[in-house]
């Protein structure tokens, strides 16, 4: 890795999802020097793991493509992947940031030809597909990954597998001696765009995610729909690979619950409404979606999706917090048990597949990091003046949809620009 040069007029953006990319691009396109770091081997964040995204239900590739084109075209923006912040000291206009860069074991010579992957046999859980699929020990994270460069899994370093991958590469792109590096930078402002992670469904014991294979999460359902995903775009039951046509969606799985996440993740209702359109897309009138909800929170223009779903005869709404899920051993069907709060009828209803609309929580526990940031009771960063020259963008600040995440990223870019402009003015 070449030396990374930065000054107190540089803006550091942490997290390369849609929010981090937006903040970095807005600032770089205003002529500012920007470094964007991402802990994963490629940019895109969780939006790149969606099948389609509302409101327009387009594939994430379209948004990604535009941002990647802007990224490649801008000399003010430098991207560092496999990089995390390990320490921050200093103050607004003058931060010293220590970064840890993990080795990719693949250099810039890589043409993404895939010969290294073909040469190895070892397989690991594929993070991009939430572990629903395996990937090789030499891999491209996903087809649109930026940078388009393979990665060697650290678990094969020192084994014959790594040597096989190296021998297969015609471009001298594999460097098995790469080491982790520590880089210290001086920057003027920091934008935290570290995003969210799905609430761990294993913790919701009554919903038996850890015990009933045909109970999956909403993020897994997104991957299932993707033609390049674990099931080739078909809705298949994990237990027996049979098509699932009768599907239940459980809202507030881990959200609005004092035992788990107290906050409303706001996106889950609209995400389930969207996912009911996936069922229709796949099966037409033969599919059946049932949405169990406390109340539907489809805000602003997402209300249209709710209105449309209510008119769809394949979609049923049941106002109820599901009490628990049990297993019909003979069929593998999960059975939802509870009481519906409109008619106060007890139900015990089997489905082919159950999708838990899991809540969104901050991906980073900022209280455990050595960074002086104000966080709220749900762990999201509060944008207050006490944070000095550090600003939160997108889901680092709240559970947000893409539209709101991007607005928040643009606002954070503007605030960071103001900080470095003040430095520039003071230094003449
Ligand atoms: C089931 C589901 C479906 C959804 N569908 C839609 C939809 O259809 N439409 C819509 O508008 N919204 C949807 N959303 C919400 C959408 O996913 C978010 O709005 C979006 O991901 C926010 O982007 P972000 O960049 O803020 O965070 P993220 O996408 O989480 O990106 C954060 C990035 O930061 C990186 N990172 C994290 N920690 C560090 C660190 N310490 N150092 C460096 N990098 C780090 C991560 O690897 C990641 O790349 C959905 C959410 C769910 C749960």
Image (cartoon, rainbow, N blue to C red):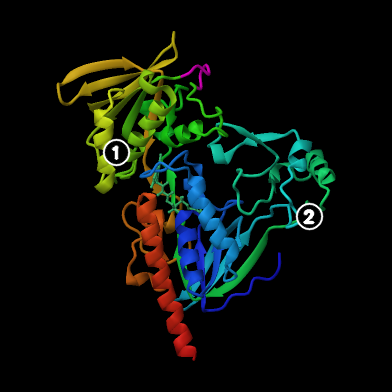
The single residue placed furthest to the bottom in the displayed view is 428
Q: Is residue 273 above or below residue 23?
A: above
Q: Quickly name the residue at label 1.
A: 305
Picture residue at 35% right of the left edge, 50% below the top: 399
Q: Quickly name the residue at label 2.
A: 177
Number of other residues with Cα within 10 Å of mark 1, as a class: few under 14, some 14 to 19, many 20 or more: some
> Quick check: is 135 in the magenta stretch?
no
Rendered image quadrant of residue 355: top left
The single residue placed furthest to the left in the displayed view is 343
Residue 60, x across and y down, in percent: 48, 45
Labelled pair 2, 1 in contact (Cβ < 8 Å): no
Residue 35, x across and y down, in percent: 56, 67
Q: Is residue 112 above or below residue 382?
A: above
Residue 205, x across and y down, in percent: 38, 29
Q: Is residue 265 left or right of residue 83?
A: left
Q: Earlier in the sequence, mark 2 or mark 1?
A: 2
């Amino acid at each position: 890795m070449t030396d990374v040069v930065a000054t107190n007029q540089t803006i550091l953006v942490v997290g390369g999802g849609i929010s981090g990319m937006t903040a970095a691009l807005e600032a770089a396109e205003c002529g500012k020097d920007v470094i964007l770091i991402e802990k994963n081997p490629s940019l895109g964040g969780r939006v790149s793991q969606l099948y389609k995204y509302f409101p327009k239900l387009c594939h994430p590739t379209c948004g990604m493509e535009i941002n990647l084109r802007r990224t490649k075209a801008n000399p003010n923006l430098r991207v560092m992947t496999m990089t995390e912040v390990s320490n921050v000291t200093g103050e607004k206009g003058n931060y010293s940031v220590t970064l840890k860069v993990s080795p990719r074991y693949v250099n810039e010579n890589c043409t993404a030809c895939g010969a290294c992957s073909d040469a190895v046999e070892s397989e690991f859980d594929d993070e991009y597909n939430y572990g629903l699929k395996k990937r090789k020990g030499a891999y491209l994270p996903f087809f649109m990954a930026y940078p388009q460069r393979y990665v060697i899994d650290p678990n094969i370093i020192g084994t014959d597998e790594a040597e096989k991958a190296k021998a297969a590469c015609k471009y001298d792109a594999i460097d098995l001696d790469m080491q982790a590096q520590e880089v210290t930078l001086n920057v003027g402002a920091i934008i935290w765009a570290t995003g969210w992670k799905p609430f761990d469904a294993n913790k919701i014991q009554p919903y038996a995610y850890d015990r009933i294979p045909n109970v999956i999460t909403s993020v897994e359902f997104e991957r299932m729909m993707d033609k390049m995903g674990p099931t080739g775009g078909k809705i298949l039951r994990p237990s027996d690979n049979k098509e699932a046509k009768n599907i239940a969606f459980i809202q507030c799985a881990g959200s609005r619950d004092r035992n788990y996440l107290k906050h409303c993740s706001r996106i889950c209702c609209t995400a389930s409404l969207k996912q009911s359109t996936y069922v229709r897309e796949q099966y037409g009138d033969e599919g059946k979606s049932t949405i169990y909800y406390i109340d539907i929170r489809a805000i602003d223009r997402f209300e249209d999706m709710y209105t449309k779903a209510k008119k769809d005869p394949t979609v049923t709404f049941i106002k109820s917090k599901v009490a628990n899920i049990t297993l019909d051993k003979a069929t593998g069907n999960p059975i939802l048990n509870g009481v519906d709060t409109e008619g106060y009828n007890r139900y015990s209803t089997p489905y082919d597949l159950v999708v838990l609309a899991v809540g969104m929580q901050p991906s980073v526990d900022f209280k455990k990091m050595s960074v002086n940031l104000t966080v709220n009771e749900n762990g999201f960063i509060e944008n207050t003046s006490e944070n000095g020259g550090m600003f939160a963008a997108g889901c680092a600040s709240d559970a947000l949809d893409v539209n709101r995440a991007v607005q928040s990223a643009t606002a954070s870019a503007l605030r960071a620009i103001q900080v470095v402009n003040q430095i520039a003015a003071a230094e003449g």
